[in-house]
Image: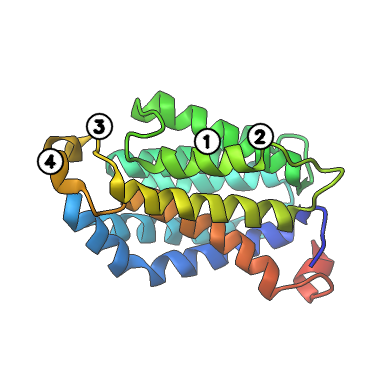
């Protein structure tokens, strides 16, 4: 499955693939949110990624991955409400700066993107690792890929490492007390329930990795990227 980078055409397909997977998880994400929040998290992210798909379709000729992800993030924010809509939207927008002057996503670009996501969540959500938020999964993914390099690792390896770390971290949020946001008022009643934002991020990263597994090098989309 070795490939050093992912080009614009394939990144567009990965976002579509991610939107499909998020939609499939809507009811599970709503159930997770119902335990500690309003119960509409799955609806929010589904609507957001539906808007992302429309943004991609309307910019079919765009081969600038920086613009592609910036527009996707703004589309996400445009149809969603609440803190998670802003945070996830800005996490996508982070790609605009991380991918500037890049024609493909490689290990180094992924590392920059994850670091930018961390900074964005801290600035917007006023959270830190251990607060039982989406940041726990993002931080774990960023930390896990930090030793990797484009010279020694391909993007598939990096996404696997990142997605596994995010999934573990999302699961571990079930053992945490929520320290920020509305759920912080629930105290130890949140124990046993993973944070829905962290779970969502693990689904997103897993979708990126799974797309590469299901579409190995040499497929039509890959050759067009």
Q: Residues within 10 Å of mark 1 (few under 14, many from 20)?
A: many
The residues bearing labels 3 and 1 have C-alpha atoms spaced at a distance of 20 Å
Report which residue position mark 2 lands on. 112
Viewer can see residue 95: no
The residues bearing labels 2 and 3 have C-alpha atoms spaced at a distance of 27 Å
Q: Secondary structure at mark 3?
A: loop
Q: In the picture shown, does residue 70 fall above or below 41?
A: above
Which residue does the image show at 82% across and 59% down from the upper left? 3
The residues bearing labels 4 and 3 have C-alpha atoms spaced at a distance of 10 Å
- Indicate the colouring scheme: rainbow
Residue 181 screen position, x and y as percent: 23, 34
Earlier along the polypeptide chain: callout 2 or callout 1? 2
Residue 8 screen position, x and y as percent: 73, 54
From the viewer's perspective, tell me whether residue 22 is left or right of residue 18. Answer: left
Residue 10 screen position, x and y as percent: 71, 62
The residues bearing labels 1 and 4 have C-alpha atoms spaced at a distance of 27 Å
């Amino acid at each position: 499955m070795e490939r050093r980078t992912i080009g614009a055409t394939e990144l567009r397909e990965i976002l579509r693939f991610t939107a499909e997977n998020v939609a499939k998880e809507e009811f599970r994400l709503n159930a997770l949110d119902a335990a500690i929040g309003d119960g509409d998290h799955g609806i929010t992210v589904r609507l957001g990624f539906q808007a992302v798909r429309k943004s991609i379709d309307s910019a079919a000729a765009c081969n600038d991955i920086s613009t592609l992800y910036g527009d996707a993030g703004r589309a996400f924010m445009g149809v969603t409400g609440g803190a998670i809509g802003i945070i996830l939207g800005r996490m996508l927008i982070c790609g605009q700066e991380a991918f500037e002057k890049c024609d493909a996503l490689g290990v180094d670009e992924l590392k920059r993107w994850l670091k930018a996501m961390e900074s964005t969540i801290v600035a917007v959500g006023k959270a830190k690792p251990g607060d039982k938020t989406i940041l726990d999964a993002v931080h774990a993914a960023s930390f896990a890929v930090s030793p990797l390099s484009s010279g020694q690792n391909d993007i598939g390896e990096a996404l696997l490492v990142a997605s596994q770390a995010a999934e573990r971290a999302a699961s571990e949020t079930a053992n945490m007390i929520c320290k920020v946001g509305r759920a912080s008022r629930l105290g130890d009643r949140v124990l046993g329930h993973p944070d829905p934002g962290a779970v969502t991020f693990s689904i997103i990263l897993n979708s990126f990795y799974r797309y590469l597994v299901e579409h190995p090098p040499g497929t039509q989309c890959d050759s067009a990227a």
